[in-house]
Amino acid sequence: MYSLFRKEINQFFGSLIGYLVIAVFLLSTGLFLWAFNGNYNIPDSGYATLDGLFSMAPWVYLFLIPAVTMRMFADEKRTGTLQLLLTRPLSSFQLVGAKYLAALVVVALSLLPTLLYFFSVYQLGNPVGSIDTGATWGSYLGLFFLAAIYLSIGLFASSLTDNQIVAFILSLFLSFFWYTGFDFVAGLPIPSGVAETLSSLGINRHYESVSRGVLDSRDLYYFLVMVGLFLLLTQISLFWKRYSKKQAISRLGIYVVAATFAAILMTNHFFRIDFTAEKRFTLAEQTREIMEEVDQPAIVNVYLKGDMLPAGFRKLAGAVKEKLLDMKVYAGVPVHVQFIDPYQDVKPSQRKGYFDSLIDEGLKPTDLRIKTDQGTSTRLIFPSAVIRLHGREVVVNFLQNDPSLPAEENLNRSTELLEYQFARAFRVLMQHKKQKVAFLTGHHELSKWQVKDFSNALSENYDVVRITPDDLLAAPDSFRAVIVAGPGKAFPERDKFVLDQYAMKGGRLMWLIDPVQVSMDSLSEGMMTLAFSRNLNLQDQLFHYGVRLNHDLMQDVQCRMIPVNTALTGQPPKFTPAPWYFSPLLMPSQNSPVGKNLNRLIADFVSSLELVSENQDVKKTVLLTSSAYARTTETPMEVSLDMINQPPARELFTQHYIPVGVLVEGKFSSVFKNRMLSELHLPAGLKPRYESPQTKMMVFSDGHLIANKVHETPKGVQILPLGYDRYAKQTFGNKAFFVNAVQYLCDDSGLMELRTRTVKLRLLDKVKLREEKLKWQLLNLLVPVLFILLFGVVFNFIRRKRYAH
């Protein structure tokens, strides 16, 4: 067997055709990766990854591997040496195995020069070495498995004919069909179960998983079984005369039945190895549990597709596809994923109406300026998906857009949140009854119009109601969370007791309190107003829970810009943006699942707060802060727009990250413990609780953080989006932050923790690439080819020297 193996190696590398085949493979691969414009080009993508190589390899291998295997048996048949081989003391397994291993070594050697691509991307990374090494080696492993199947198909094709050209074409056709043909057939209008089975027979489905750097035992089993199947077919083809037809069919049938039985056993018993640095393809336990509960086939339509997508959005689309592929693994029923190009889905004359219907459905488009050969064009894309299950649908918008961050960072943040967004969407679709979230009323809280946009956002997942303290006292278990939003009137002790007992029974509270009162009407009319303390009779209660609200006002260098008339008297108005330090842009904590990857929040007249109490059973987490350059001023104080003309000295803003929002979670004791309750006139038979189970609440020192702007018009009430600044024409992160906050309060499954997952942004060094691009292109185009030529010279020199005597 070893002598036959050596013969095949010597025969391949002893001919010019062998080197020509490998050189063409390396040159074509290098051109697509480093020179030609397109989706595979590494420098143009801007990312430190070899994804282009592993995406292109299946198609390049369709030509390389048939060229390697076409002569292995066909040439033996043509020259008559096959009969001589069959008379040697070799079993059919040894004969086929020797040629197969020789071909495998040849392909492995052809891959060796591509390690230069890895070295180049490693050196071009920003910083150097930013490429995900583990994922790359895992992807190379997938490439090796792909070559293994193609080689077994090529050997089988070569065993069927004595013509090398016919063997090449037959191998190419069979490999192409096995790679993508099953997916094509599965896409036809056939039952979903049949389509799923057919798709699982194709190479593409299994290679896609492994090429990312994830080794699934079922994919490994598939590759081994398919290699074994085609090697068995090769043996039967070569030794057809030695076997009766019944024996051949029997051997093949036993193999197929045994392989099928083992595959069925492995359906629910498998393991996965994630080679990526951040384990980004390893789903959290919460996600796996949600997908295991999916009891009906689901349809996921992703609208992020198109030939003109920039590299960053192509990478995001790839991440979406990969995440859905991982989630499908754990679903007990089929999850059908379809990528749709909105520009190709309808005729050009119908696009506007089609796009409008997508927007009405809840998909959020974004405008992109794309450079083409004809110039620059604007294109509308939809980085969104629609998931349908149980006759309902949920829209998932991927793009997290913070205007203060570069595009690459925003796209990376979008990638980090994919698992959370999809898992939450599936859980919402499987909910049979919505939980109730209540706004407390009776103390001049924000009106229903002021919280209209926030309520609409919550209503997608919750039943939003407005209640009085008596409603809460009568049925505290009916409400999952209660929001106290911007009260303007002092709380009676009885109402405080109702809220306290709600917390003692495990209820979730969100407090949005204004410790200082400022008249916005006076300011809007250009008048001076007075900022003074507001007594809501809540200080003692919040202090007992671990939070103290300060009666001050915060000023921040990072603030809203407002238009100020800077024209001289008698001249036409001239408005110039000026900083209004009393409207800070608050920073959500990036270490919390509530605020991670969110834009800043816009606010007006915010106070500071402090964490107090040393209760070891209560954990406190800061959720929202000022910037690193802020200050607080004591009240009462005068406030007017004239302060813009006399701003405080920059040196006064010395306070860093002043807390304005906190999460407090744990076991609380009642504020009314050891107090007389007779004057509260409570219902007869009510038994107060003085210790709470594990629960949580949030406190914010601005009651209007969830308030949208309301305008009275002749046509009715006009509601502006929450967080929208009409001067900057920008929507800040208020709505997303507080929707997350409510979800965190209501969630006990740990699903919100998925928002803390981190994916490292791996970019190429643009400066180095711009200055040294030609050097790296020539290096990766010429050196691999020169390496093979040098190998050929050395190999043949040693071979001739050995056999010269």
Image (cartoon, rainbow, N blue to C red):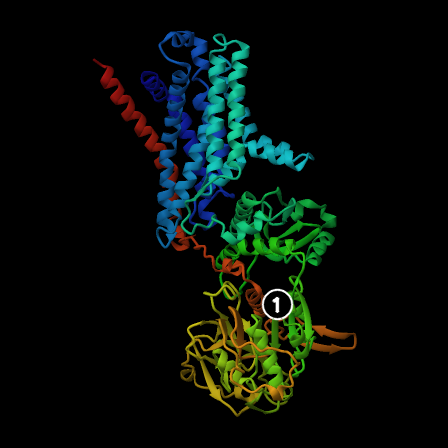
Residue shown at the point (51%, 33%) measured from the top left: 59
Furthest-front residue in view? Answer: 685
Name the image quarter holding the C terminus.
top left
Q: Is residue 172 visible?
A: no
x and y, in percent, of residue 50 in the image: 43, 43
Query: Which residue is identified by label 1?
Result: 480
Furthest-left residue in view? Answer: 805
x and y, in percent, of residue 765 in the image: 40, 53
In this orientation, which residue lies closer to the viewer: 92 or 597? 92
Q: Which amino acid type is shown beneath numbered disc 1? A: Arg
Does 622 sit above or below residue 203?
below
Residue shown at the point (74%, 75%) measured from the top left: 717
Does 389 sit above or below residue 103?
below
x and y, in percent, of residue 489 in the image: 63, 86
In this orientation, which residue lies closer to the viewer: 728 or 402? 402
456 with respect to 150 (left or right): right
Furthest-right residue in view? Answer: 715
Name the image quarter holding the N terminus.
top left
Q: Is residue 783 visible?
A: yes
